[in-house]
Image: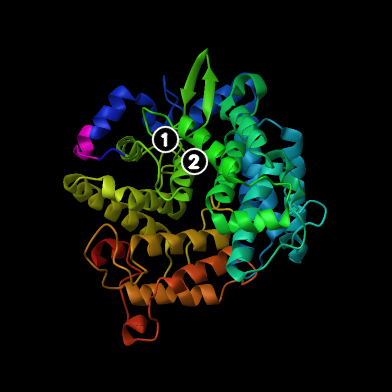
Amino acid sequence: MFRYRLAVPALVMMVLTTGARAGPAPGGQASEGFVTRALIAQQLVRKDPHYAEMRDERLERIAPLAAQLHALQERGESLPCSAQILNETRWLLKATDNWSVVDRNIFELRTTLLDPDQGFDVSQAPHDGSWWTSYDSWFKKLDPTVNALNRFVALDLKPSYPLHFLAPIATADGLVAMLDRLRVNDVAATGVDQRDELGAVAAFAAELAFKRPLGDLVRQTTPELRLDQSYAADLERFLDGWQDPETGYWGAWYLVDGRLLKAADLSFTYHMIAYRDGNVGRWDRILATTLAIRTGEYPYGWRFKGEDNTHNAYDIVRILELGWPHLAPEAQAQWRGVIRDLLRTVMAATLRPDGSFAPIASFDSSFADAQYYGVSLLVKSGYCSAKPPFWTATRPRAAPATCCRIADRLARADQRAKPIGAAERRLAKAGIDCTTPAATAEDASARPDWFGEDW
């Protein structure tokens, strides 16, 4: 492992000069050598000259439906079927030109919002063993399935049906072949960006391979899945070979005008680091690249539509927690300022006086997801935690009252939504005592600058 011996500005300059792919182009525009959302959109336009106008017209139709969904969820309606349709439609719009399917989905989304009774969509499907049956795309079922399986592990339960839908990645050879195929994109030729599918498969496989209790449960349930030592070893070799030596990051690769561009993808990199508990190489490059893409547009930067949010901020803080031992003291000092600024900005924009986190209509899949990532960020940063923060010795003043108000709001949320339960468990494990006078005292959490003043 490398140690991060240089000052942060020097390493950022090194990344921007010797590994230009790490940084976003100014203003989110496509630029030579960079992978950005704009560059991928340009490739989709090459395939379909009307792509941008067709996409934007449909995004306008989706926006009020997404707002309606989040409002219903905030009032206690889970609507998992509607949430899945919205999530998949967003992916179709940013990664394909499949307008007929998008139009069908918009119609179905509008229809399902009229029926709040969607409990059928949270159970395991008998025919293939997957969860969340309103997803049409195979890879979209992976994330809800692994979330359900992790919950089963925690409760010492077993799924009711074998996971037959995982047949394409049942062996190490099948998994590696799929990842290798999905890794390289020629969007202008195919009209499809495979980035989301690649990320879903890689993250799911990493959880199976590197979380032993989860792998054991799947083996017991579905013997045809060959989750042996060679499965994990072959996946680990693939992941090590996939990491970009210049940026330290993972991401999809894109063929553009005869060049192969390697994306520095924040989400991919977070998952690869987190599921391996920080046991990755090139930490000096990872940390330099993470700072270099600070103002870039997600997933090739920290921001979504120019703004920070709880989900991406949580990924950043988790990467820094695992990478903190690789930072020299002067670099740690500079990162402390970055973390404080990030937390202050995100909390001022999302945390409401009632203790709920405002969902971003065009980013968060649901109201419940917004609560989960808000809680996760505050717990991991040390604000809502009895454990000392990894990055500072200074303790926040108003934490108990703020965190207990969040806990109270979670208790009044729709308990059928799994992210709500996950947020409650994460907050409970953090050890904040909500029975003391400090837990009910008035604090400054409603002020826009409250978070920055508390540390």
Residue where numbered disc 2 is placed: 268
Whole-percent x, y for residue 71 in the image? 60, 63
- Which quadrant of the structure image shows residue 246? top left
Q: Secondary structure at mark 1?
A: loop
Q: Are the residues flagged by discs 1 and 2 in contact, CB closer than 8 Å? A: yes
Colouring rule applied to residues? rainbow
Residue 211: percent from the left, percent from the top?
Answer: 54, 54
Residues 409 and 331: in front is 331
Q: Residue 259: within the magenta? A: no
Disc with the residue nearer the chain's start (1 vs 2): 1
Query: Can you identify the residue that label 1 sits on?
Result: 249
In the image: residue 222, left or right of residue 328: right
Q: Residue furthest left?
A: 330
In the rendered structure, the answer to whether residue 104 lies left or right of residue 89 reads right
Q: Is residue 354 visible in this depiction of the protein?
A: no
Q: Can you say whether 445 is above or below 91 in the image?
A: below
The residue depicted at 33 percent of the width and 56 percent of the height is 343
Is residue 443 among what the camera can see? yes
Residue at 33 percent across and 39 percent down: it is 283
Q: CA distance from mark 1 to mark 2?
A: 8 Å
> For the point 66% across and 46% down, which residue is it?
140
Q: Which residues are magenta?
A: 4-10
Residue 224 versus residue 16 in the image, above or below: below
